[in-house]
Image (cartoon, rainbow, N blue to C red):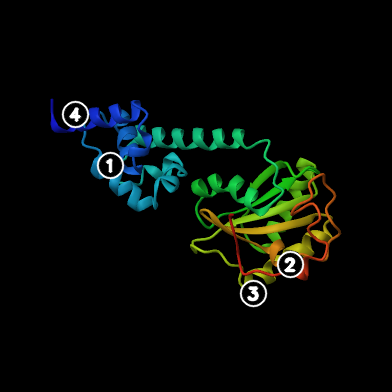
Amino acid sequence: MGEHDGHRKRLRARFAAGKREDCDDLALLELLLCYALPRRDVQPLARELLKSAGGLGGLMGMPAEALTAFPGVGENTALLLALVGETSRRSEEQRQKDAVLNSPARVKDYIRSRLLFAGEDAEYAIDLDMDLRPLGCLMLSGAESDRAEQILRMALSEGGRTVIIAAGTKEPFPALTDGELARVERMYETLRGLGVTLLDHVLIHDEFYASAAQLGELSDSEPVRTRYHAPYGGLFRNIRTYRVDSIFDD
């Protein structure tokens, strides 16, 4: 038995024994690569992939054709990684299908897995029913006018006329700048002209987030009528009575 065989056996035994907290991202990726490259020392490749992709989430969000651009990653390895990433993404979507997005914290929890796969600076629009349950979720792209059109098409297709925009940021402590708030206000007015209510714009990094609605920047709308009362149920009543720079989890 070679040195690499012993290392692989220890990785498998640790994971099979349920000691998953002892397996860091490098160990998990090594173990996964063992199934695509059974006769090779995969630790250097796993280390380089994590470094180049910015972490396990970024790596698992890549399509197979992008993965083959990495030295040492062949077609089989790329397909395995892409398959695991897509399976994980769909599993998370299924788990969250009945989520109620009645607070910025819940929006953050709902969208975090998508940001892991799509990248830290991706932006999504979530179409909601009257109970603030997601009807659809769309990654936005292009200019502001293009994004407004994308949101309208999703709202017409899914049947909801209330949306939340959630965007990732690389800043560890999210804060909506004056420029970002001006952009939020423009989108709010554009969508209102199209018959769509922008309920909130949430900026997210890992466990931290900032909410435009909790900053009081979306106060001109009538209260959204839902069975939930805090904070989005009566969000637009007297919202300007308080302001904060950023909102964090309790």
- Which numbered circle lies on residue 72? 1
Instruction: Tell me the distance, in whole angstroms, between the alpha carbons under discs 2 and 4.
Output: 59 Å
Residue in view at x 13 percent, y 29 percent: 2
- Which numbered circle lies on residue 216? 2
- Which numbered circle lies on residue 178? 3
- Which numbered circle lies on residue 5? 4
Residue closer to the observer: 237 or 55: 237
Q: Which amino acid does label 3 sit on?
A: Asp
Element marked by disc 1: loop
198 up-or-down from 219: above or below:
above
Q: In which quarter of the image is the N terminus?
A: top left
Instruction: Tell me the distance, in whole angstroms, between the alpha carbons under discs 4 and 3.
Output: 56 Å
160 up-or-down from 172: above or below:
above
Q: Which residue lies furthest to the front in this view?
A: 250
The crowd level at tag 3 (other Cα within 10 Å; few <14, some 14-19, many 20+) is few
Residue in view at x 50 percent, y 35 percent: 88
Instruction: Tell me the distance, in whole angstroms, between the alpha carbons under discs 2 and 3.
Output: 13 Å
Residue 53 drawn at (x, y percent): 39, 50
